[in-house]
Each structure stands twice: as C-alpha cells, then as structure tokens.
Image (cartoon, rainbow, N blue to C red):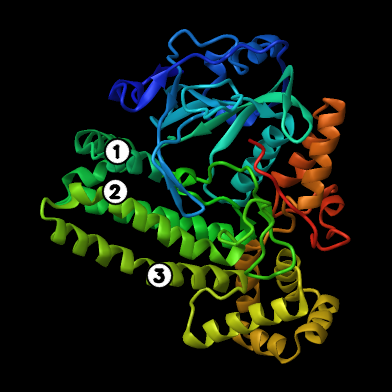
Amino acid sequence: MKISNTYLQLGTAFSESINPLPVADPHLLLWNQSLADKLALSQGLPDNENALAQLFSGNDLLPEASPIACVYAGHQFGQFNPQLGDGRAHLLCEFVDDHQQRWDLQLKGSGPTRYSRRGDGRCALGPAIREYLMSEALHALGVPTTRCLAVVTTGETVYRDLPKPGAVVTRIASSHIRVGSFQYFAAKGDVVSLKTLTDYTIDRHFPTLKAAANPVLELLGAVMDKQITLIVEWMRIGFIHGVMNTDNTAISGETIDFGPCAMLGIYHPGTVYSSIDSGGRYAFGAQPSICRWNMARLAEALLPLIDEDPDKALAQAEALIADFSPRFEQAYQTMLGAKLGLDEIQQTDVALITELLEQMQEQQLDYTQTFHQLTRSLTEQQIATKLQDTLGDWYGQWRQHIGNDSKQQQAAQALMQQSNPVVIPRNHHVEAVLQTCELTNCSAPADALLKVLRSPYQMLAETADYQDLPTDNDRHYQTFCGT
C-alpha cells in the first residue's frame, strides 16, 4: 500500500493538520474485507481485530499518515456559509491501489477540529452503520458512491436527542473535493488558491483535460456530466439523498454524506423523509433541478479562471449550464426506458413512460415493486394478469412496444433485470437493523441485511425477508442528520 498526502501539500490554506482524538475502548464492529482486498489494502494493514480497531478509531496511525481536516464552504438549504469544513472528520492519508487509482482514507466521528463550530466531533453508532449499509447497497446497485471500510465502536457516549453509543466510520473516496471547496476560495477572492485547487482537481480526476483549449470550462462540463450520471442512477433505484448542499456534492460524482438519506417507496416525486427538509427542497423529484443549481454555483466559483474577461467567462459558463437540462433529460429518459425494456427511446416511448409514472402516483404504487413485477410479467402470466388489472390499457400498450417475438421479449427482460433491483435497503428494515445493533452492540443484523443488499439483482434464499413494504407505507417515516 503506497501512502501519500498530496492534498496536505497544497498548503495551510486548504486544511488544518490535526490528529484524531483518541477514544476510550475501540472495538471493530464492521469490517469490509472485500473492499480491503479490492483496493489492495490488506497487505499494508494489521491482521487482527484489536489492531484494526486501534487504527480505525484514530488511536493509532499508519506510519506515513499525516491527518488533516479539510476546509470548504457551501450552500446549505440555499443559504451560503462561507466557511464550513471537516468538523468531525480526519483525512488520514491517500493511497494508490494496484491499478494506480488514488483513494482517500478518512475517519468520521474522530474528534473536533477548528471547523467543528462548537460540535463534539463525534458520531453516534446508528448513523455510522447507516452509512456503511447504504453505501454498500448503492455500490452493489451500480450507483457511484463513496464506501465504508470499517465501523469501530468507541466505548463512549455521544449526546444528541438522547445518549447514544459512539462510533467512528472509515470512508474510502476517490477524493473529498466538493463544490464547496471551490466556493470557499472564490468567496474569499483567493484566485491563487482557487487555481491551485482547480489544477490539482484536473490532475487528479480529469488529467486528459490538461490539453484542452480551456481546461477550466472543460472541467465544469466534466463535473456536470458526472453529476448527471449520479442523479440518474439515484432516480433509477429510488434513492433520496436528503441534503444535497453544495458541500455534500463531490466533484468525483460519488454519493457522499448519507446523513438523512432514504429510499422511495410509494412513488411520488414530492417525497421527502428528511426531518430538516421541511420545504421539500431536496425531494425525490427535485434532485435533478437541485443538481443543476449546484452546478451553477460551481460555475460561479470558477468564473475568474474560465476567462479573464468577466463577460466572456459568464457567457461561456451560462451556455454550459443551460445545456444541463437537455443532457439530463436524455439520460433520464434512456434510464427509464431501460427499466421498461426499451433500448431505444422514441417520442411515443416518452409518452408511455410519463403515463406509467402518473398512474403509479395516482394509484400509490411502490416504485421498486412495480418495476420488478413488470420485469417478471414478461415470463409469468399470473403477474401479467394482475398488472393488466392494475394498469389497464397502459399494460397492453407497453407489451406492444416490447413486441411479440420471443427474442424481443427475452432481450427486453434482460435489460430490465439489469435496471430493476429485486430488493433495496427499505427504510423500515434499515431502521430495525440500526436499533438492534445499537441495543446489542452486535453486527449480526447488519451482516444479514448486507448479504442480501450485496446481491440486489438476485433472489437469494433470504431476499424475500427484506422485500416487504412497511405497514404504513412510510407515511410517518423521518430521517435525521445525526450530527
């Protein structure tokens, strides 16, 4: 494992050098061996649980690690805060895997930093397990995401609404550079640091852009494309991030910061579960428009580097942002078409897709279950008959679009099986696991759920145990940030 600290080398304007705060009694609760093996981490780490617990609680450090807390700004629910930063996280180091891919190794819940804003710098066990579960689920579902390597209990109590057991979660990310990272220097008028960050980002994530006529404008376009891909994938599986602030928007296009996230059950674009999103700013169906808004904020931050002439810079950035909606719509309709077994989208297909979503909303149909049943209906007559009763003429029209030829139907079903999971991390099952793990300090419930979530397109023997809908259809369900 080759360790380095390139972000630290950018200078003191970008971060604070600070070690994690030791914890009282660390124990390894969850360990992601498959991730450690994939990234070739195992060869550089201890081979016993006690040593791993010491390392991933922050009590011990890898010899080459130089921990930092990164600074950034951000729009939080539309309100700009000129200085945020890692208030309870420490970027321990970076490492390069066997494929020459660079990764960040970060602890969360590892103690206060100068950016804590009177917080305790700690994390409760429930939110730590939630991030582990949800990030592993998204990865298996094919959604770009940061991932968790470990959850370590601390033997300490943290105080939120109630006393909670403490934990430290280890996050792996291709970087922790955020839209808010650029906003921080732009708001300060520090163009030198802004350029340093931009050059570093291009070198690390988009090296081919260095030869472009305008690398900064191309960077904006590349980040925008990654965000479009990410949001389309969220919408495909019914993921609701819950807090799409610019400081939670990673330049890499990975899902990051799982605080109040949840999964869509009954289809409605206005669905909100986050207790702190009373206005519905980050509702399921609002995620594309918020993504565009966040990209506009990135464009604003980059204006001084796009062109020395402010008017020219603004015109170029505006033209690129204006292209967001048609780019997104094309990707979104292609995704929905794949969920219906349509590999080429025509205008008549768009109308068909729209009508289905309208029916799902009117009849309060479950998003995942409906698409899973449509997939099965191509080969199971009993389900086809049931859907004919539920969806009426629409179902017959859809079958006509698929075609009567057996090869067409097989190809359509194969495409649908790749797009429509048989199981998702349903909110009530996630909450049950979190509550049990908190009470018992045991990982068994999480391990059982993870086994199913890591094979979301296959029917395992245990899958049916996690497919049921909540008795109240999540009508009163709420998620909380956990900070």
- From mark 1 to mark 2, how far is it between C-alphas? 8 Å
Q: Earlier in the sequence, mark 1 or mark 2?
A: 1
Residue 88 coordinates in the image, percent (x, y): 55, 27
- From mark 1 to mark 3, how far is it between C-alphas? 28 Å
* Label 3: how many Cα within 10 Å (few below 14, some 14–19, many 20+): some
Residue, x 25% and y 67% (percent of image)? Answer: 319
Is residue 308 among the parts visible in the rendering? yes
Position of 198 with respect to 88 (left or right) is left
Callout 3: helix, strand or loop? helix
Is residue 406 among the parts visible in the rendering? no
- From mark 3 to mark 2, how far is it between C-alphas? 20 Å
Residue 301 coordinates in the image, percent (x, y): 29, 48
Which quadrant of the view contains residue 392?
Answer: bottom right
Question: Which amino acid, by three-letter code, is at mark 1?
Answer: Phe
Q: Earlier in the sequence, mark 1 or mark 3?
A: 1
Q: Earlier in the sequence, mark 3 or mark 2?
A: 2
Position of 152 with respect to 346 (left or right) is right
Question: Which amino acid, by three-letter code, is at mark 2?
Answer: Ala
Q: What mark, if any, has residue 185 been given in the picture?
A: 1
Kindly indicate whether the residue at mark 2 contacts the one at mark 1 (C-beta within 8 angstroms): yes
Question: Which amino acid, by three-letter code, is at mark 3?
Answer: Ser
Residue position for label 3? 325
Against 411, residue 190 (above or below) is above
Residue 239 coordinates in the image, percent (x, y): 63, 56
Residue position for label 2? 301
